[in-house]
Amino acid sequence: MASASIALPKVNRAELLKIIGLPSEREQAARIADGAGELVRTVVSVIDNLVTACIERRTANEFLQKRNEVFPQYFVAMRALGDLTKIVLPKQAIERLVAESFSEMEADFRELGPPTFGTDLTERGMFTVWTLRKIHDLAQEIVASPIPIEDDSKNKDNEMAMEFVTLAVWNRFHVDCLTKSMRAKKPLYPEVVEPIRDGLRAAVNAYACIRRWADLRNPKAEPVLSHVEWSEEDECLLADSMRDLEQELD
């Protein structure tokens, strides 16, 4: 994944779990802005401008260069949006906001995707939003789970947290590129489509990562099989079946 080569700030394991589904465009900022006013609008405007700067590139190389330049800023801005949202909105309001955001993204892909990108990229976008929903559900499990106490498990927990957050925000950046293109009626240049398509693939890796992380937080106990006593009838049936098998082999 290209983001692995981009320097990103360290984050607390839970700080970015809550932002995977938050709205990140100017048009949607009012839903959060009632509590924090202009500050939220400013952060969302920064995110919007960073995404717009990328989707306006004409060639793949120009897009990649601009993406590498702006992604660390996008990462920090999304973190700030999550922090502000947590401060100004109660948990139930955030969950409602995330659910509405996912539904709107899906509706946009259904209605605006085909005329903007064609069938293939639209279907990939829809699948990505569906995957983000699954990721969000697992994220809530992790937030509610105890942090490991043992040093080895705690270190693994930290590593999985940073790996997941990087993958998830990397993927969300490319989803935002598509949603911005659709909503602003800014068609992508042909060469830019493939890098964005590749960025969408990070959703699968992010899901696999958070699945492992959830299993680390809540390891599944191996089922204990009770001892079954064999009766004389069971022994006879087994002996008969073994004789039948021997005769077939002969």
Image (cartoon, rainbow, N blue to C red):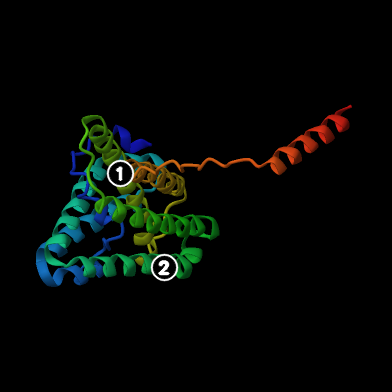
Q: Nearer the viewer, residue 241 or 30?
A: 241
Q: Quadrant of residue 183?
A: bottom left
The Cα–Cα distance between marks 1 and 2, rounded to whole angstroms, is: 35 Å
Q: Would you place residue 97 above or below residue 119 in this image?
A: below
Mark 1, secondary structure of its residue: helix
Q: Residue at x 33, y 47 (%)?
A: 168
Q: Residue at x 46, y 60 (%)?
A: 126
Residue that protrudes farthest toward the top in the picture: 250
Q: Nearer the viewer, residue 155 or 239?
A: 239
Q: Would you place residue 39 above or below residue 225 in this image?
A: below
Q: Which residue is mark 2?
A: 108
Q: Residue at x 12, y 62 (%)?
A: 87
Q: Quadrant of residue 66?
A: top left
Q: Residues within 10 Å of mark 1 (few under 14, many from 20)?
A: many
Residue 49: percent from left, percent from top: 24, 56
Specify the amino acid type for callout 1: Arg
Q: Nearer the viewer, residue 67 or 220?
A: 220
Residue 102: percent from left, percent from top: 36, 64
Tag shown at residue 217: 1
